[in-house]
Image (cartoon, helix red, strand yellow):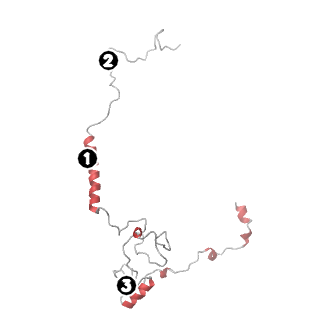
Amino acid sequence: MSFLIKSAPFRHFPLHPLVLAPKRTHWNKDYKPGPYPYSLEEKRLAAEKYNLHPAEYRAYPDDGFGRGDYPKLPDLGYESRDHHYPWDNPEHLRNFGEPLHAEFGLVRQDRLNVGVKMRYPLWLQVLQFFGAMLASAGLFWFFEKFKAFHPVIPTQCPEEGVTHYTFEPEEEGKPGKSK
């Protein structure tokens, strides 16, 4: 295999590490949120930065977690979005330039959908689970004392004075003797 690589026509072209490095079109500082907006003008500029209407824009509270001017989006999972809408990125149900939720790792399609109202409340689900587990354990404990099985043949106990087996060779003339 190395013969093919060494004899290739492009082996004479040196590959510089900068040529092999991936192209970067952005900086990490571009993703960092700005300072918390206090004035209406700062809020308008932050809403414009995140492609939101100023009436829709609401920032996270300035509580020291470093979210700055990042918009507080509703806690709706991606399962709540319309699957038939012509999304720019249909795999993730989002459009180009749409801001991600600050907790995107928790509201993706393969995670819990916090916006759905469950059919039964959580306390009832926990109660049903532990009720089923305790009922199963109680039945196991109760029936562990009573072994339930069906005997297939009667018990074969030897009778007094009857030889049921022997290790002596068979006598001459009796059936079963091998010659």
Q: CA distance from mark 1 to mark 3?
A: 59 Å
Question: x, y (%) of residue 125?
Answer: 29, 59
Residue hosting label 3: 55
Question: x, y (%) of residue 161?
Answer: 32, 14
Question: x, y (%) of residue 22?
Answer: 58, 75
Residue drawn at (27%, 41%), measured in percent from left and top?
A: 143
Q: Give the mark toward the camera: 3 or 2.
A: 3
Q: Residue furthest top?
A: 173
Task: Please tell me which residue lies in front, 96 or 173.
Answer: 96
Amino acid type at circle 1 is Gly
Residue hosting label 1: 138
Residue drawn at (44%, 86%), measured in percent from left and top?
A: 48
| SS for dot 1 | helix
Question: x, y (%) of residue 168?
Answer: 43, 15
In this rendering, position of residue 121 left or right of residue 45: left
Residues at marks 3 and 2 touching, judged by CB atoms closer than 8 Å:
no
Task: Please tell me which residue lies in front, 106 or 8.
Answer: 106
- With respect to residue 99, does 155 lie above or below? above
Mark closest to the chain's N terminus, 1 or 3? 3
Residues at marks 1 and 3 touching, judged by CB atoms closer than 8 Å:
no
Q: Quadrant of the N terminus?
A: bottom right
Name the image quarter holding residue 141.
Answer: top left
How packed is label 3: few (under 14 Cα within 10 Å), some, or many (20 or more)? few
Name the image quarter holding residue 146.
Answer: top left
Residue hosting label 2: 159
| SS for dot 3 | loop
Task: Please tell me which residue lies in front, 106 or 3.
Answer: 106
Residue drawn at (25%, 47%), measured in percent from left and top?
A: 138
Residue drawn at (37%, 84%), measured in percent from left and top?
A: 55
In this rendering, position of residue 172 left or right of residue 2: left
How packed is label 2: few (under 14 Cα within 10 Å), some, or many (20 or more)? few
| SS for dot 2 | loop
